[in-house]
Amino acid sequence: MASIINSIYILKRTIYGTAKFNMTKWRRGFYIDRSCFRSKAHVISGNELAKDIRKEVQKDVESWLSLGNKRPHLSVILVGDNPASLTYVKNKIKAATTVGISSEVILKPSHVSQEELLEVISKLSKDSNVSGLLVQLPLPEHINERDICNAIAPEKDVDGFHLVNIGRLCLDQSSIIPATAAAVWEIIRRTGIKTFGKNVVVAGRSKNVGMPISMLLHTDGRHERPGGDATVTITHRYTPKELLKIHTQRADIIIVAAGIPKLITADMVKEGAAIIDVGINHIEDSVTGKTILVGDVDFEGVQEKAGYITPVPGGVGPMTVAMLLKNTLMAAKKIIY
């Protein structure tokens, strides 16, 4: 009789305990479709990150000057009157001023010959007062951009486009890293997005953006110039959309620099993926008829599914300018060369 009573008691405790446990789980949301409560992606503010970097650069400039060193100086050559280029140069000069880097803009008409432009570059490359030098791209069609980029002294090449800097980057050696690629890397690093062993898709194969970003992310983290140890797939504007979708749906991180508005849509993104939008596209707003700036990602749709996402504007753009300032200070200190 006692054994029967004990069995009933144990059964009651088991039923009660299970019910209590299930109720606790219910209260905690274990049995609720949690997807309907999922918050939107964390929007990474490039403006805020850039502000932090500018403060760091300003502090370093002040320390550099306090030791009796020459103030870092940035020279920018602007060819023609492209409105976008004028805006970019204006932003760079303004940002340089805020951190204590002196600067100048050398204006040349769109019909300037390549020979004359090369002479200006040669003169500035030899000028000991110039710490960093860049030629704003794009250039008129009659000028060979590669020849121009290679004419800048590697140690003053703050855009990181000289073949020596690109070559050192590809060999995992210390180099001046292209500012946009450095911006993407810094966003990932400062946001705490993990890259080790992760799948990454880089949509865009340009030698100034897509390629250096890919190099930074896939190379060994133990090398002279540490990398992200990720598995990187490079796609581009001619990758069939259905194939691109297969790649992006597997990606933990998607970096888009293809120059195609809203190339990446929500159905192409894995839940919780990190999305870095490098795209800069000027399109006409269908509602207002005004020209607006958009990226390569359908921000509103993808934001509902991603874990992290950068906006356009306010994402990679301000970070690129901040990394340019960092490269200028690095060139002034002669850290690489």
Image (cartoon, rainbow, N blue to C red):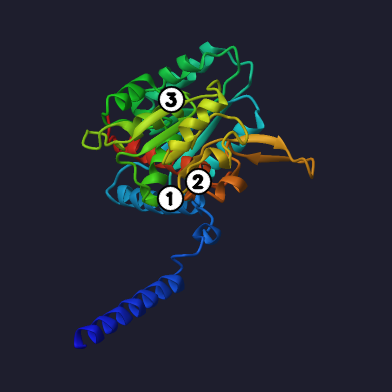
Foreground of the two, 176 or 219: 219
> What amino acid is labelled 1 in the image?
Arg
State the mark number for residue 242. none
Q: Disc 3 marks which residue?
A: 124
- Residue type, numbered disc 2: Ala
Q: Is residue 163 above or below residue 326?
A: above
Q: In the picture, which quadrant includes the N terminus?
A: bottom left
Say which quadrant the C terminus sits in.
top left
Q: Where residue 298 appears, x then y in whole percent? A: 61, 41
Q: Residues within 10 Å of mark 1 (few under 14, many from 20)?
A: many
**Residue 95: mark in rendering:** 2
Query: Do the numbered discs 1 and 2 sit on residues whose CB atoms are within 8 Å?
Result: yes
Q: Is residue 326 above or below residue 54?
A: above
Crowding at mark 2 (Cα within 10 Å: few <14, some 14-19, many 20+): some
Q: Residue at x 54, y 33 (%)?
A: 105
Q: Which image quadrant is residue 188 in?
A: top left
Where disc 2 sits, the SS reads helix
Q: Residue 255, percent across and down?
A: 47, 36
The answer to whether residue 85 is left or right of residue 1 is right
Q: Determine the residue positioned at 22% across, 33% down.
A: 223
| Residue ID for mark 1 | 54
Which is more toward the observer, 195 or 164? Answer: 195
Q: N-terminal of the two: label 3 or label 1?
A: 1
Name the element at disc 1: helix
